[in-house]
Amino acid sequence: MTESNDNTPRTADTAADAAAANTGANGKLNGNDAVNMAAEAWKDASSRNIPAIDLGDTPLEEDTANLRQGPSLHDGLLALLPLVGVWQGEGQAHDAEGNQYTFGQQLIIAHDGGNYLTYSSRTWKIDEEGKPSGADVRENGYWRVSLKDEIEMTYTSSNGIVEIFYGEPFNERAWSLQSASTMVTETGPKTLGPGKRMYGLMPNNNLGWVDERMVDGEMRPYMSAELVRIAG
């Protein structure tokens, strides 16, 4: 919880708010404690998972977005454990002309027992009447944690962006990332500057995230959303 100007408690409503609300959580969890906390927080989604693709046998583990099913999460990823799951909700974004619009998002963060998380985001535009109005941007990539406990996140997008982020856990419920390399194809966005992202679990256990971008020498909001865990 945070407080408004009139000292009335309110629920944190952005990833940055979620991080601030949990600033005191500096202790490290062991794997069992982390899994147990996640299981308690998301009981309603505990039986759901991403479907397996039945296209023939391979000698590899299937991807899972449910910590109760499939291979065990690699020990090197415990700092990212609360992110694993399927998340869905709505947010706000700015188009190339700077106009704000509402979008829907489904975010899948999964693993196959390897020392990385897979990251897949699909978004769709929502019109002024609150109805879906067509596909928007897709992102696919990976999250990793280095031996120095530095988060590495890479992704490519459907609109011609390839980006590398580095960061660190803000605490055990929030993660701060900053772009180290932003590349745009010839047909991609012409004015996309370097940025930073914050992902954080809110007091209601929803996932909030914020993407800010450098515009005219200052960081400005670019995209943000609040997502509910629907599987995992």
Image (cartoon, grey):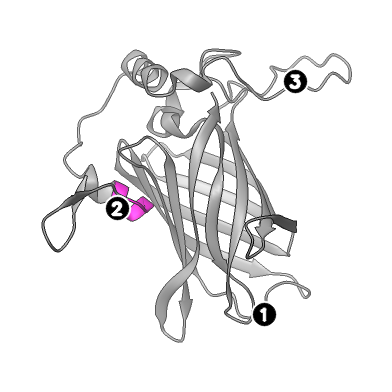
Q: Is residue 15 magenta?
A: yes
Q: Which of 198 and 230 is in front in this view?
A: 230
2 or 3: tag closer to the N-terminus: 2
Q: Does dot 3 land on a helix, a strand or a loop?
A: loop
Q: Return the residue at label 1.
A: 190
In the visual, does 56 lie left or right of 101?
Answer: right
Identify the image quadrant of the N terminus: top left
Distance between mark 1 and mark 3 Cα atoms: 38 Å
In the visual, does 114 lie left or right of 218?
Answer: right
Q: Which of 137 and 92 is in front in this view?
A: 92
2 or 1: tag closer to the N-terminus: 2
Distance between mark 2 and mark 1 Cα atoms: 31 Å
Q: Does dot 1 land on a helix, a strand or a loop?
A: loop
Q: Return the residue at label 3.
A: 52
What segment is highlighted magenta in the picture? 13-18
Vertical order, 194 against 60 (above or below): below
Residue 135 visible (yes or no): no
Query: Residue 114 at x, y = what percent?
Result: 58, 25
Q: Does dot 2 land on a helix, a strand or a loop?
A: helix
Q: Does the magenta stretch include residue 68?
A: no
Amino acid on which the number 2 mark rests in the picture: Asp
Q: Nearer the viewer, residue 152 or 228?
A: 228
Foreground label between 2 and 1: 2
Foreground label between 1 and 3: 3
Foreground label between 2 and 3: 2
User: Which residue shows up at 59% across the image and 74% down it?
Assistant: 192
User: Looking at the rendering, which quadrant does residue 76 occupy?
Assistant: top left
Residue 17's disc is 2
Q: How many marks?
A: 3
Residue 159 visible (yes or no): yes
